[in-house]
Image: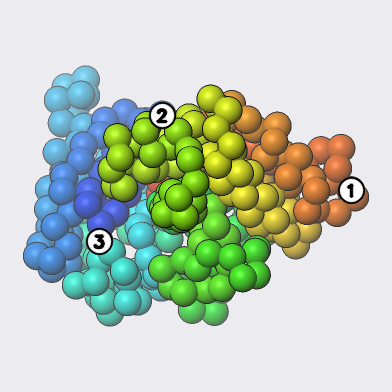
Amino acid sequence: MSSKDAVAVAADIGGTQMRAALVTRGGELLDRGAIDTHPDDGIEIAASRLAELVESLGNGNGNGNGRVEPIGMGISTAGPIDPDTGTYKNPPNLGAWDEKSMKPNLASRLKIPVQIGHDATLAAFAETQFGPHRGAQNLVYVTVSTGVGGGIIANGEMVTGAEGHAGEVGHITVIPGGQRCNVGCDGCFEGNASGPSIAKAALAHIDAGETTAIWEMAGHDRERVTSKVVFQAADAGDVVATAVREHAVKAIGIGLGSLLNIFDPEALVVGGGVAQGLAARWDEVVSSVKRFSLAHFQHNPRVHLTTLGDDVGLLGAAGLAFRHER
Ligand SMILES: [Zn+2]
């Protein structure tokens, strides 16, 4: 087997699902699987179920010579997490795993080196390893989705911070006095641009008695008022929906513009459902970023939608395993 054919085991662990794949050095996913996480069963049971999933990968896909031996395993996980030990630190979606790590269990059972990283940081790392921004030494990845999170690569290194908390771009203040996020910050990026915050802003207009097509389109059901419905109503010319969308785009512009100013990245890559929902109006997002960034970004603000899709976590995990290959 030439080193070009080498594969890594990649895993992506979230609060509801654990995914695993065999990934080549070039970023091709050879085989993949997924299981439910069930975090409340405890980290030991989850680790052993993940190991079983990994052991099932690649079987029957070979040429009769047996399974390709992976060079190592990388794991992308929701955090916060200590990137050296893989120890979770009060993780909101994996609460039962606090102060515990999967790393020793998996390394001894699978008999390969195991590396663990925070999902947003590894998404940024994946963008520097695969796809159109491959080779970038400075890259910021921001997901605008149910929450707003980020990962930072600076001078070719993953920025993790003193205790693994770096990259919380969602909680920088962008609209002082604006909506609060679940954590309670006063007018942060997440509180003014995430999917739930867009829905909350729309509902505030509806509750104030303003007439808007959003309410009809959501079937008069508060639960169905989503960023997607707001964007659809705005596209149809609804005044309230347009105002809500413009507020979110302003918040995104301030947040991303500040990140551009601070990190001067080769690319600022944006993913997540809200960002994808703005794909058809990406020029407005770019204009907003320009408005809130310095003069040298005006002709090329370097803001791009991700092209790596849902596999960004697996690709980042694989990239981490290859980076630690001996
Ligand atoms: Zn916040």
Q: Give the residue at mark 2.
A: 28
- In the rendered view, does 56 fall on the left or right side of 146? left
**Closer to the camera in the image, 284 or 126:** 284
Front of the two marks 2 and 3: 2
Q: Residues within 10 Å of mark 2 (few under 14, many from 20)?
A: few
- In the rendered view, does 283 fall on the left or right side of 243? right
Residue 208: image x %, image y %? 47, 55
Picture layout, residue 283 above or below residue 97: above
Snapshot quadrant of residue 92: bottom left
C-alpha span from label 2 to label 3: 23 Å
Q: Amino acid at mark 2?
A: Glu
Q: Amino acid at mark 1?
A: His
Which residue appears at 25% of the width and 66% of the height? 94
- Please tell me which of labels 1 and 3 falls first in the chain: 3
Residue 17: image x %, image y %? 22, 48
| Quadrant where the image shows the N terminus | top left
Q: Give the residue at mark 1.
A: 296
Residue 27, numbered circle: none
